[in-house]
Image (cartoon, rainbow, N blue to C red):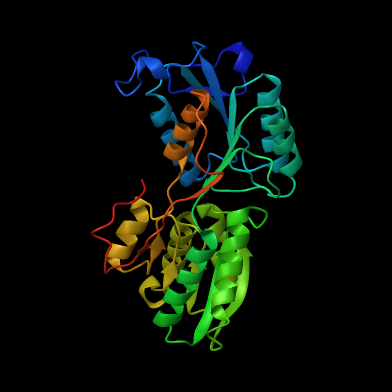
């Protein structure tokens, strides 16, 4: 469906004509149509594209909800502008995943003060001026990733870190948790932390850069599976056997499952998009119901060859 001129900057998704059987007459809101807006950071990352898709598919069950979304193309200023434009147009609920926890604090707080509920997915802002936050425990995941690599390296080796966006809360926590855990293993050191923003193309460049620099590393900690896949591609292109360089990722997408099966990826961690949960929280708010908790943490599972056949990828 093409966006109308009123919403020319945003794509409309997920409208359906028939009500889901789960929507009871007593649960129908007073208005005939509510607009839920999602200010996405970037659609260039497959996990973030899947996040939009999960929101769309869940909200498609509710004919009284219209979903619109924007793509900031990985630009914090543009994501802020998108949020402000959505608020100015009077959307009923704002959902976002803030690229910068500090810089986006006040713009999101202003929307919240306007009386528009704000749901944060995966990434938090500093402060408490938002309605609901859904995520997984990024620091705990990072601790586990460090433990797995330390065990594989038998307590001795050098690790190359491919970092998620450092201004985002997952980027900070996935770095902090990993470094904290490595303090227990004095024989293991991080030789470089290279920012790749969870983009496969940037991860390829950073690993190629490390190889040109003749950086010595025995393992790679990729803070997302997109970066892990990029690292695999760069190593193979350079004639390096990834089976000899253990790599851990985060997300557990289908490509990661295949790479674990093949022995090219050592481990990944399930990290759902939270799109379904965010959509359901929005519907609850539209129906005038109070959410049980301000912050919700979804469980994450470490996936290796030992359990790869038992756990389905997130997409």
- Say which residue appears at 46% left-offset and 70% top-offset: 145
Q: Would you say 220 lies left or right of 306 here?
A: right
Where does residue 217 sit, x and y in percent of width and height?
Answer: 52, 78
Of 181 and 262, nearer the camera is 181
* Residue 251 picture quarter: bottom left
- Say which residue appears at 32% left-offset and 58% top-offset: 257
Any part of residue 196 in sight: no
* Residue 196 picture quarter: bottom right
Where does residue 111 sit, x and y in percent of width and height?
Answer: 70, 31
Q: Is residue 59 above or below residue 310?
A: above
* Residue 246 picture quarter: bottom left
- Say which residue appears at 48% left-offset and 79% top-offset: 218
Of 170 and 71, nearer the camera is 170
Q: Would you say 24 lies left or right of 291 here?
A: left
Where does residue 236 sit, x and y in percent of width and height?
Answer: 41, 66
Quadrant in which the C terminus appears: top left
Q: Is residue 255 above or below residue 117?
A: below
- Say which residue appears at 48% left-offset and 34% top-offset: 281
Count of numbered labels shown in the rendering: 0
């Amino acid at each position: 469906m093409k966006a109308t001129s009123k919403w020319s900057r945003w794509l409309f998704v997920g409208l359906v004509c028939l009500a889901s059987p789960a929507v009871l007459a007593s649960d129908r809101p007073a208005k005939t149509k509510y607009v839920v807006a999602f200010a996405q950071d970037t659609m260039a990352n497959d996990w973030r594209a899947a996040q939009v898709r999960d929101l769309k598919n869940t909200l498609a069950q509710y004919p009284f909800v219209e979903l619109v979304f924007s793509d900031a193309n990985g630009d914090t200023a543009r994501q802020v502008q998108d949020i402000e434009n959505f608020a100015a147009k009077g959307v009923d609920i704002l959902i976002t995943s803030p690229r910068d926890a500090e810089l986006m604090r006040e713009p999101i707080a202003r929307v919240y003060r306007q009386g528009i509920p704000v749901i944060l997915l995966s990434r938090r802002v500093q402060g408490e001026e938002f309605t609901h936050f859904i995520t997984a425990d990024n620091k705990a995941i990072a601790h586990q990733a460090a433990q797995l690599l330390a065990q594989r390296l038998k307590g001795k080796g050098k690790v190359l870190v491919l970092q998620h966006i450092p201004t985002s809360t997952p980027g900070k926590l996935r770095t902090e948790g990993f470094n904290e855990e490595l303090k227990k293993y004095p024989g293991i050191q991080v030789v470089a932390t290279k920012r790749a923003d969870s983009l496969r193309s940037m991860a390829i460049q950073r690993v190629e850069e490390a190889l040109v620099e003749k950086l010595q590393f025995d393992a790679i900690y990729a803070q997302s599976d997109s970066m892990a896949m990029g690292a695999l591609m760069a190593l193979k292109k350079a004639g390096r056997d990834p089976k000899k360089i253990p790599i851990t990722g985060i997300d557990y997408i289908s490509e990661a499952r295949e790479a674990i099966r093949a022995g090219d990826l050592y481990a990944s961690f399930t990290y759902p998009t939270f799109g379904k949960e965010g959509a359901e929280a929005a519907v609850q708010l539209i129906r005038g119901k109070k959410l049980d908790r301000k912050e919700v943490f979804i469980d994450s599972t470490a996936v290796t060859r030992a359990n790869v056949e038992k756990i389905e990828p997130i997409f």
